[in-house]
Amino acid sequence: MPAVSLPGIPVIILEARLMQVLIVDTTLRDGEQAPGVAFSPREKVAIARMLDRLGVAQIEAGTPAMGDIEQEAIRAIARQGLRSRVSTWNRLLLEDIRSSLECGIRDVHISAPVSSIQIRAKLRQDYRWVLNRLRQACRYARDYGLRVTVGAEDASRADPGFLLEFAYLAWESGAERLRYCDTVGVLDPFATCAHLSRLKEKVDLELEFHGHNDFGLATANALAAVRAGVRWIDTTVGGLGERAGNTSLEELYRALTRLFDLDPGLNSRYLPGLERYVTRAAGRLPPAPVDTSLKVPLFPGRRHPAARGERRGTLRSSTDFAKIILEEY
């Protein structure tokens, strides 16, 4: 891969033999936050098994705080004996971590807002409160022998100084990885590469990138994160997710292998079947067929969600994920 030099960004040369990109698929958690999507426990187990067969490094199986049905699905996935790591998404609450333990999970993701706007709006708290709760939650999970990753929600709009403090504390508290979240999809590839290059220079934690597609840049931003040396990338099948969606697993795979000559460790023969199954289970139409001579969709009404913007500002109606963020704090 040729080196790229941009103002303020160090020259980075990536070689496939030195770096393997690792996929964290969050179709069963963030993908299910798409409006109108609610997988059954049986569908969740089937999707998890397909993702495992595909070869993703980690499967985010769900959010135990969502209730009994969600926990039933997570337990069923945990019992499958998958080779992929199986993790859950947790708030800064000890009861969330206890619920994950009861589901038989050994990998927990503990997530917290890091931008001032989200700390005020979602938590009605301040920076110090977030740090104290993060320390408590991480140490509690580590005391039970769990592997911990930490999510910095809305990192792309966070104060850089506080983000660093948050990352240092996560490392000191035993986390093995920091998820940098572009929660509202405001980054472009140049900013993504610059932010993550600087963060990577200053913290010892492995970094993970979580992108959203509000401006149609989720996959491009994920590639920019890889360019900055980030090995762990979050995806969903078909880019399924709230508002305009997330980084597409299929797009990322094709770009990594064909443009970057990097190996994400996937057996691509299983991608089409996985995509078809998730599309049906989610009640989504397949991508619009394109007239290659005219370069336009044959059915113009079926355009990409980022282009038409119809999902921005929405949350899934089947289970109110936003409610659990606020109700316990």
Image (cartoon, rainbow, N blue to C red):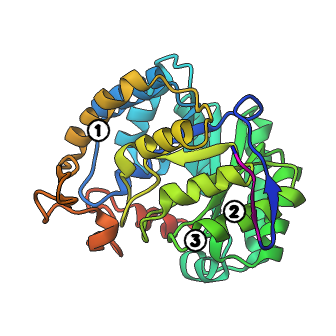
Mark sitting earlier along the chain (1/3): 3
Q: Which residues are magenta?
A: 2-6
Above-or-below relation of 40 to 227 = above
State the mark number for residue 278: 1
Q: Residue at x 85, y 51 (%)?
A: 171
Mark 1 to mark 3 CA distance (whole Å): 27 Å
Question: Which residue was labeled with disc 3?
Answer: 187
Residue found at the far front of this picture:
293
Q: Main secondary structure of the magenta part?
A: strand
Residue at which label 2 appears: 193
Residue 198 image point, x, y percent: 82, 64
Q: Nearer the viewer, mark 1 or mark 2?
A: 2
User: Mark 2, residues whose alpha carbon is within 10 Å: few (<14), some, or many (≥20)?
Assistant: many
User: x and y percent of residue 247 in the render?
Assistant: 47, 53
Is 227 left, or right, of 56 in this rendering? right
Q: Quadrant of residue 167?
A: bottom right
Up/down of 81 relative to 168, above or below: above
Q: Quadrant of the C terminus?
A: bottom right
Q: Amino acid at mark 1?
A: Val
> Of helix, strand and loop, which one carries label 2?
helix
Residue 4 drawn in magenta? yes
Q: Residue at x 85, y 67 (%)?
A: 165
What residue is rendered at 36% in x and 51% in y? 240
